[in-house]
Image: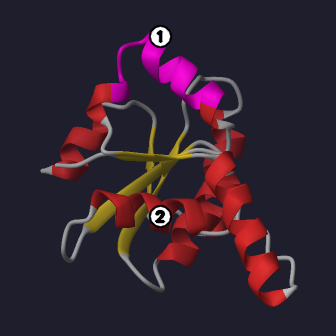
């Protein structure tokens, strides 16, 4: 199994957390807001049009999967906000992917569950351990 991150945070923020908890070596790809902004600038230079590439746009998810570079990938994308689910659903046009809503802390779980259902999450989990059931 390969792991990637598509984060809406700046690279230094994402890497700071991953390094602090010694998680960075487990990820084959880390795509951040920096790469999204770089793609936006590239698109603007080549077309003259502004195209936001941060979530809910699927760019960061698709780029992370592309960087992992496995043929015919089957993916799950775990997100804790509605924009994450929208991005994963948009990525379905190009990729076999499951949009997973993570409820996280007990605060607002009912509200978030309703929101994830409303935007079409394929799966909703409360604990990271539930991913082991999905991955098998």
Q: Is residue 15 left or right of residue 56?
A: left
Image coordinates for residue 105, horizontal then vertical, percent: 58, 23
Q: Nearer the viewer, residue 86 or 115?
A: 86
Q: Identify the main secondary structure in magenta.
A: helix
Q: Is residue 115 visible?
A: no
Packing grade of label 2 (10 A; few <14, some 14-19, many >=20) is some
Residue 15 colored magenta? yes
Rendered image: mark on residue 121: none
Identify whether 50 is placed above or below 116. Answer: below
Tell me which segment is drawn in magenta. 12-24
Rendered image: mark on residue 63: 2
Packing grade of label 1 (10 A; few <14, some 14-19, many >=20) is few
Say which residue appears at 44% left-offset and 17% top-offset: 19
Rendered image: mark on residue 20: 1
Q: Nearer the viewer, residue 39 or 115?
A: 39
Callout 1 secondary element: helix
């Amino acid at each position: 199994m390969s792991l990637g991150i598509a984060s809406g945070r700046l690279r230094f923020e994402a890497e700071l957390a991953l390094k602090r908890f010694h998680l960075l070596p487990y990820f084959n790809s880390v795509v951040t807001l920096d790469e999204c902004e770089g793609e936006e600038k590239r698109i603007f230079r080549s077309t003259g049009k502004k195209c936001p590439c941060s979530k809910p746009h699927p760019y960061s998810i698709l780029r992370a999967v592309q960087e992992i570079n496995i043929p015919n990938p089957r993916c799950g994308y775990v997100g804790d906000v509605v924009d994450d689910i929208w991005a994963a659903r948009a990525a379905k046009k190009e990729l076999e992917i499951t949009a997973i809503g993570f409820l996280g802390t007990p605060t607002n779980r009912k509200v978030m569950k309703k929101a994830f259902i409303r935007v079409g999450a394929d799966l909703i989990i409360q604990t990271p351990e539930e991913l082991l059931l999905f991955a098998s």
